Every structure is written in C-alpha cells, then in structure tokens.
Amino acid sequence: MAKPTRVTGEKIWLDGRLVPFADANVHVLTHTLHYGLGVFEGIRCYRTADGRSAVFRLTEHVRRLLDSAHINLMQVPFSQEALESAIVETLRANHLTEGYIRPIAFIGDGVMGLNPADNPIRVAIIAYPWGKYLGEEGMELGIRARISSFTRHFVNSKMTKGKTCGDYVNSILAKREALLDGYDEAILLDTNGLVSEASGENLFAVRGGELMTPPLYGVLGGLTRDAVVRLARDKGIPLREAEITRDELYIADEVFLTGTAAEVTPVREIDHRRIGSGRRGPVTRTLQGAFFDVVAGRERKYESWLTYL
C-alpha cells in the first residue's frame, strides 16, 4: 500500500488566475467546508512513449465536473473550454510532465445555513506529482480488500452520477475501516447487499474467462471503467454488466479495480479468501497492459483520449 504523500506545488489556479501555492486559501466560512456541497474531478497526466505529456480524457472529465455541478444546482462561472485550458495551464505552471489534477468547484463564503443563497461558486485547479495510488507492488501482485460494513449510497438517497464532495464521507469511513483492519481497500455493497464499488474505484470480476462489472445505475460511471470496457471488447473478452454477490467475488478467477487514481489494480484477496491464483491474473494483465499502452500514446485507435500539452 502506497503511503500518502503531502501535496506541494508552485501554483494553483483559483477563480481564473494562477496564484502561489501557499496563497491559495479560502475563508473559514466557506459554505462547502461546512455542508459538503461541492464537486470535483480526479484527472491524470502521463508522460507518453515519445517524451510528450498528455492528459487522459480531459474533455470527458471536465464534462463530468460540469454535469456534477448541474446535478447539484451549482452554476460554474467558467466554460468547458476555459476549464480545459486552465488545467493545461496549471500543469505547465507547475512544470509537470506527469501528475494528478484535482479541479474542484465549491460554494464560497457569505450566508450560512443549508441554503447557500447567492454565495459565489468558486473553482480551483491543483496539479501535483502522484505515483501509484495503491502501490507499485499492488499493480503486479494485487492488493488485499475487505467487504465494508458501510453500505454504498442508495441511488435516490444521493445522486450517483455526480462526484459530490460530501458523498465521499462514506468512502472515507470505508477506507479507514479497511486500513485499520490491515487491508488496502474497501469494497462496498449496495442497499440490496450486492457489490457496488470500492471506496474510490469501480470493480470488475472474471469467472470462466467472462468479465463482469456492476451495472451503471448504482455506481459512478468511471472514465477508466469505460476505457476498460472498450478495451475488453477490442480484445474479444466476453463482458457483461451484472449484479454480483459478495460470495461470487470470493470464487472469481480474478478481481480488479479501475479508477483515475488506481488505474487498473488487481485484487489478490478479499476477506481472507484468496482470489484465483492469489496474484494478477491473465485477463487483468491483458487489460492493464492495454490501458497503459493507451495512456503512453502507443495505441493509435484511442489517440482522441489524449490531450497533449
């Protein structure tokens, strides 16, 4: 498991301009700080095989940020094009050839209470170096996960298509519980007791050569998830969206997680049950390799997923 790294940098883009890293501050009465209504994205920039740098699925990530804001009745004061340009500008200002990008739209200070009224909608973009979220070793050997005691959000208790700041308290509780119990990651079930997703990743299972993943209606539609689905179809790997029970995970041949942070990470053990051979399986290895070929610019078919700096 990778150790958390303190975030540092040179510049942060805040409300339309780059400011020194240490000066990107907000008031203690910032509405989102108190009530959790804000939206964010996680995006990666990769160093490609030809030495250039490229952001993975930049347009789709920014679109999802704006969709999340729309779902939550937040009017972001910047266009899609302006935000895409700002992300590239922030990477350059921090002299990053690779890194993680965190755009966040949040409600500023003004009135307090559950109705934010006309408090300003503010936007920040942070870019910083970040390695493998679940560790270099985990990418090859696989990680250990547990089924969380916390239930994933019900589809109508919150809106599952938005990346909303406050929703991630659920993820934090599940993640910390897993770490305290000696695991690397948590897998959450939905209100029907079916597999939903991990604390910050989508989930895939392999059984008898067939790839399965929970249906989109109850999970966030991850862009890495979507990439893996398309790559699996390219490779002729049978795939279906299916409801999955926790014991089906125990007897799966392979399980892996996908996400901007986790990329494609195998799971070798769940709840003290070894998964398959207890290390990265052949389907996971194939899709992991295909994914890294794409982000390295070695796969021409998916060049449109890369925005070069």
Image (cartoon, rainbow, N blue to C red):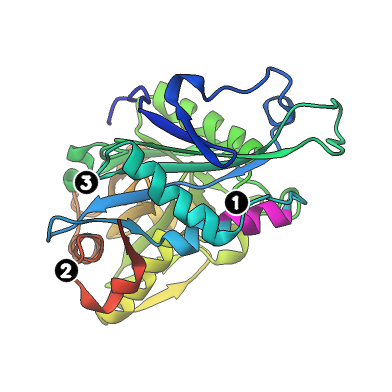
Residue 227 in which image quadrant: bottom left
> Callout 2: helix, strand or loop?
loop
Disc 1 to disc 3: CB gap under 8 Å: no
Residue at the left extreme, as displayed:
50
The disc, 1 or 3, on the residue closer to the chain's N-terminal end is 3
Q: Earlier in the sequence, mark 1 or mark 2?
A: 1
Question: Can the viewer see residue 245 in this picture?
Answer: no
Q: CA distance from mark 1 to mark 2?
A: 40 Å
Residue identifier under label 3: 139
Residue 193, disc: 1
Residue positioned 62% across, 65% down in the render: 217
Please give the range of residues in magenta.
Answer: 65-71
How many numbered badges does the structure rendering display? 3
Residue 302 x %, y %: 30, 74
Q: Position of residue 97 (x, y in %)?
A: 23, 45
Q: Is residue 204 above or below residue 187?
A: below
Q: CA distance from mark 3 to mark 2?
A: 20 Å
Dominant secondary structure (helix, strand or loop) of the stretch shown in magenta? helix
